[in-house]
Amino acid sequence: MLFYVARRLVSGLVLAVMVTLITFLLLAPSFNGIVGNRLGSAATPETVAQMKAQMGLDRPLATQYVDWLSHAVRGDLGRSYFTGIPVRDAVEQHLGVTLSIVLVTLMLTVVVSVALGVLAASKGGLVDRAVQALSLTGHLIPNLLIAIVLVYLLAVKSRLVPATGFTSLADDPAKWAQSIFIPVIALLIASVAGLTAQVRGTMIDELRKDYVRMLRTRGVPTRSVVLRHALRNAAGPALTVLSFEFVAMLGGALIIEKVFAIPGFGSYAFDASLQGDIPIIMGITVFAVLLVVVVNLTVDLVNGWLNPKARIF
């Protein structure tokens, strides 16, 4: 297993290098514009050329990327062009804000989706149709619309939670819970819709298999058959979908963070892109790729633990 984990981590690093190289090459045509943004109204061809030389952007692209990569592998992602803050510190801070929202959403997604999916598959009939209707509705309603409606109902009209802003968990747990309540619900509805459908489908397939009939004929309680045997075997595909939902949550967090003025990973990436802050953009790319690699590896390991037949290590 250690060899498998090491191999996956190495492949993840290779993927990170490829993605950052592509990102850097896509940013290269905008170097003059980025320098012009820093100089403002004082930008002239001469000052732009001088600033590019100071920033090292006048060197060959291969030299620039290799220089950045040689520092990155040592944990030095450079400093922001506009604030001078170390990229690693800035990205970690903003990523922590986003993860505090996404991880809570992820845990609630697992609990709610498994409960609804198992209930729909085991009960059938009206319960199954109701769960399918809820799942379809969650797919159709955009996160942004959900967020706007929740802000009006819970923040503007009822004043139960703040409409915007973010409080750190370390500063005040109660205010932190209030500040993430609406963003979590907005992300939760769509993610629950996708995972519930997957859990329901795989559970129905498992409950129709021969081993389930055999367990029932032996007098094993239905609760044990469903939760201890069928659910465990159905967890693999659901975990795969959950990893996709995690990535989708990171993407959805961009919209949610801009709406609620939350200083998270998504809004920070958006602002850095508008400014053309190359070190920040490259650092965000590294963290995003490595985060996806770690999540996918974790899903594979958990899936192998739940179902030995699915092990690939």
Image: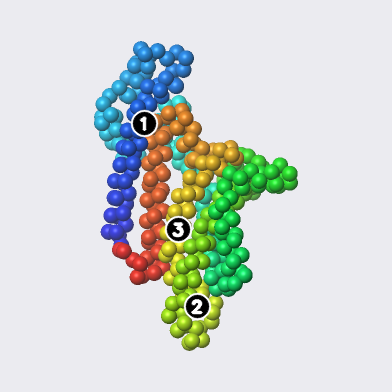
Which residue appears at 57% of the width and 72% of the height? 124
* Residue 257 shown left or right of residue 294 in the figure: right
Give the SS element for disc 2.
helix
Characterize the local packing of mark 2: few (<14), some (14-19) or many (20 or more) Cα atoms within 10 angstroms.
some
Left or right, 110 with reference to 148:
left
Circle 3: element type? helix
Q: Residues within 10 Å of mark 1 (few under 14, many from 20)?
A: some
Q: Which residue is mark 2?
A: 225
Q: Is residue 214 left or right of residue 189?
A: left
Residue matched to label 3: 241
Give the spatial CA distance, label 3 vs label 2. 23 Å
Q: Residues within 10 Å of mark 3 (few under 14, many from 20)?
A: some
Point out the frontmost of discs 3 and 2. Answer: 3
Residue 280 rendering spot, x and y as whole percentages: 42, 34
Q: Marks 3 and 2: CB-CB under 8 Å?
A: no
Q: Are marks 2 and 1 in contact (CB under 8 Å)?
A: no
Amino acid carrying label 3: it is Val
Counting from the top left corner in percent of width and height, residue 267 is at 51, 37
User: Regarding mark 1 in the picture, which secondary structure is present there?
Assistant: helix
Kindly identify which residue carries mark 1. Answer: 27
Q: Quadrant of residue 236?
A: bottom left
Residue at 38% x, 61% y: name it. Answer: 301
Amino acid type at image mark 2? Val
Image-quadrant location for residue 55 = top left
- In the rendered view, would you say 73 is above or below 62? below
Q: CA distance from mark 2 to mark 1?
A: 55 Å
